[in-house]
Image: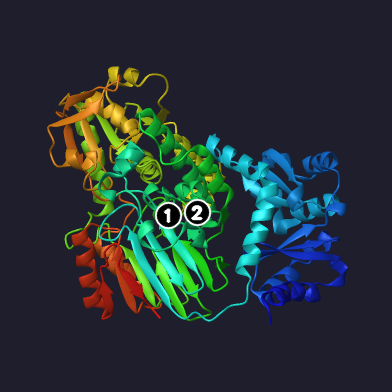
Amino acid sequence: MDDISESKTLLDKVEEIMPPEAGFIKAVYEGPDIAVYVSNAPYLYNNDGIIRNISASIKKKLIIRSDASKLLDAEKSKELIDKIVPPEAGMTNVRFVPDFSEVCIEAYKPGLVIGKGGVTLKKIVEETRWVPKVLRTPTMNSDVIKGVRQLIFKESEFRKKFLTAVGKSINQPIMKSEWIKATALGGFKEVGRSCLLLETNKSKILVDCGLSPEPSVKGAAANQEENKAFPYLDSANISINDIDAVVITHGHMDHMGFIPYLFKFGYEGPVYCTTPTRDICALLLYDYIKLVQRSGGTPLYEEKDVRKMLMHMITRDYREVTNVTEEVKITFHNAGHILGSSTVHFHIGEGLYNMVHTGDMKYGFTKLFDPTDTRYPRIDALFIESTYGGNNDITPNRSDAEINLMNSIKETIDIGGKVIIPLFAIGRSQELMLVLENYLAANPTYKLDIPIYLDGMIIEASAIHTAYPEYLKESLERRILSNNSPFESEIFEIAKGERQDIIDKGPAVILASGGMLNGGASVEYFKELAPDPKNKIIFVGYNSSSSMGRRIQNGASEIVLPDQDGKLTPIDVKLKVQTVEGFSGHSDRKQLMNFVSNLRPSPHKIFTMHGEEQKCEDLARALSFRMHVEARSPMNLDTMRFK
């Protein structure tokens, strides 16, 4: 059977199974899903078991859409929606998308828009024929979420054509793979520029495609230094047009910061990730461009390239099985690292081979997330991060870490100093906010009586967290849904006006973005606070080997930084420097070992990555000894053949 007739078979099957009462019009591919256009959408919404059964039968997600001729006028539909949805839902925006016969409803309480058992949605469909898509409005203002959602809405015509093309591409007849291999293109025996090329004779998929953290903020010229900033795409013997799909594990620059560069030079394919990861990517990529421009450098790409990337993103939920090529399915699972972070399960060639890529993961306690998932259908090979995989990488008990942090802060406050805590805007910032808020609430006798300032991207990042509470721990999700978001606690004060005003005031705690001090608000505060021995800088997260943060940790007495006029000026480092372990979003050695021991099923082969050379090798040896399987630490440009 040729490709065309084979591709029609699946759509024909939908038509054959669809009950006549639905008024079937057509079925079309929509990315990895199938959109079914009908004249009687309310019938299917009131009998939703029909859709579940058809989806199970064809192993595809079905999206029901009304035929355009049946849609009620948008203005009248808006009036009806205003009456149907209770005011308590807090609707903030209603947008009609004719290209998808869809109405996007944004609200503070999406559950009330949906209604018990979907009753409110069903009523909207019944009275307007528009199919609702419900989105949560963040409890804090988020320019990024507004911008991304507006872009997706504005480009709906392009999105429809793009998704149709992707759907046709991945619904070709499955050809038996002759071989499977993976090539390390970055992030092996190092931290940064993470990239793995997964190949069969029919498919080429990039898993992450990032930038190294140190030079990436300095611009294109600096990035070329020693060729250590970019993935080795030019050594993989593929062109950009050969890539079938890009899969992002999470939204940190060392995992996705090079992807807009692919679009700049002609990539037109899909990028798969979770919805929070998409929004976090937008936040960090736009910030990267501004940061490089402010420093006088030339960014690798422009904002238009980031927008192009966003328009090509296809978002999926955890545990949602998705075809990314005709022979490769992926499933995202919770990684526990940052909001929306994922381990990725790859199912290749109808059971020929299965592998799990952890991205960055946390298999331990945090206040934000549940630990990394350990249940998968099958694992022939495991690629596991090794950031703290060294023999001595054991973090302190979390309770002790919190006490150490609070005592360290109080010690400095008591002598009239200021504490600067540089943080990654996504993840560590929110974790530390929860630590401070919870500790002060649980210990009323512990008095700081000083402002705790938030500065930089932390505010926007926290807002994004409030838009996706379902990705957080259940207890935290309940707080946000109950209008009690800890990220808006009265103990925090958003830095406004000139930073010098904060510097000139009395004792304070400053949480500032820029975790490795390679850029961001933390660097500006450090310049002013460093010469005073009463002040303190506390590191609570990872600093890469050549970062400014690592140099300060290692005892540098002087740091050269540009002043307001861009002139390089030496800064005396006289403030106290302390590292408080226990708050990392990465697993330590013990947690990594326990994760692999608890994986079900157990992997047959293990490859370590995303760690300094010795740490990757230490972890591989230990896992080989404990698990009695082949475990090794590849280096960049190594290729692993699986079949």
Relative vertical location of residue 64 with respect to residue 251 in this rendering, above or below: below
Instruction: State the image quarter where residue 592 is shown.
Output: bottom left
Instruction: State the image quarter where residue 106 is shown.
Output: top right
Residue position marked by numbered label 1 in the rendering: 369
Query: Which of the marked residues, 1 or 2, is nearer the chain's N terminus?
Result: 1
Q: Position of residue 598 (x, y in %)?
A: 35, 73
Residue at 74 percent of width and 71 percent of height: 11
Residue at 75 percent of width and 61 percent of height: 64
Q: Which mark is residue 80?
A: none
Secondary element at tag 1: loop
Q: Are marks 1 and 2 in contact (CB under 8 Å)?
A: yes
Q: Position of residue 546 (x, y in %)?
A: 22, 44
Horizontal arrangement in the rendering, residue 356 relative to residue 522 (left or right): right
Closer to the camera in the image, 60 or 470: 60
Residue at 53 percent of width and 70 percent of height: 329
Q: Which amino acid lies under the numbered mark 2 shown in the image of this protein?
A: Tyr
Q: Position of residue 56 (x, y in %)?
A: 66, 74
Neighbours of disc 1 within 10 Å: few (<14), some (14-19), many (20+): many
Mark 1 to mark 2 CA distance (whole Å): 7 Å
Neighbours of disc 2 within 10 Å: few (<14), some (14-19), many (20+): many
Relative vertical location of residue 67 with respect to residue 354 in this rendering, above or below: above
Look at the image and tell me whether residue 220 can be seen: yes
Q: Position of residue 602 (x, y in %)?
A: 36, 78
Q: Which mark is residue 471?
A: 2
Closer to the camera in the image, 516 or 174: 174
